[in-house]
Image (tube, grey):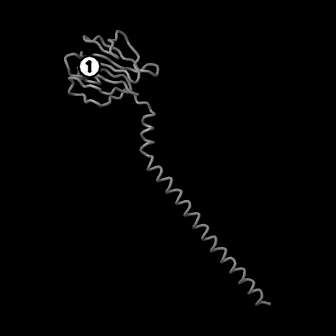
Amino acid sequence: MVSNYLYLAAINLSGLNGLSSIFKYIIIGVIYVIIIFALRIMYKDMKNGDKKQMSSRTSKKTFGLEVIDSGMSKMLKNGSVIPINSEITIGRREENAVVIQEGYVSGHHARIFPKNNAYVLEDLGSTNGTILNGDRIQNKVYIRSGDEIKIGTTVFKVIG
């Protein structure tokens, strides 16, 4: 009788060993599946990471001036971008945010400043004027993306 119990216990234990090895393989398989999914996610992030960073930067709507034609100015380069986060002044004097060293530009020529979620261009009483889209401005005017601003011989394009 004791041998029957030992025999049954051995059968039960051998059954558990069989089940435990099956569970081992199932757990290992689940771990492999998790690792594969994690690697796929990391690969997609690395592959699309630059696109997401660029779109998040551009979705921020950076407002600024792109130098289309630097004219006689030696300090500005064609294609460079001047970000506008707050009020900026443009002129020949060094204390301006944008310095244009040429004879057609006044010391304090123009300024651009934010107002009511938009941006305003103002001529500061310059001798040769500030040109917006081919027309000399008389008062403060709102500017928007795509506008061209000419100060002296320098041409800017509004971006953002």
Secondary structure of residue under mark 1: strand
Residue at image point 68% right, 76% down: 16
* Horizontal and vertical percent position of residue 71: 23, 23
* Horizontal and vertical percent position of residue 92: 23, 20
Quarter of the figure with residue 84: top left
Please determine whether, in this image, residue 5 is positioned above or below residue 106.
Answer: below
* Closer to us: 96 or 18: 18
Quarter of the figure with residue 120: top left
Residue at image point 46% right, 22% down: 117
Residue at image point 29% right, 31% down: 79
Of all residues, the one furthest to the front in this rendering is: 134
Of all residues, the one furthest to the top in this rendering is: 138
Please determine whether, in this image, residue 132 is positioned above or below residue 37.
Answer: above
Q: How many marks?
A: 1
* Closer to us: 38 or 124: 38
Horizontal relation, residue 107 to residue 24: left or right? left
* Closer to us: 99 or 157: 157
* Horizontal and vertical percent position of residue 57: 42, 36
Q: Amino acid at mark 1?
A: Gly
Crowd class of label 1 (few under 14; some 14 to 19; many from 20; radius 10 Å): many
Instruction: Indicate the quadrant containing the C terminus: top left, top right, bottom left or bottom right.
Output: top left
Instruction: Indicate the quadrant containing the N terminus: top left, top right, bottom left or bottom right.
Output: bottom right
Horizontal relation, residue 150 to residue 24: left or right? left
* Horizontal and vertical percent position of residue 38: 52, 56
Mark 1 = which residue? 91
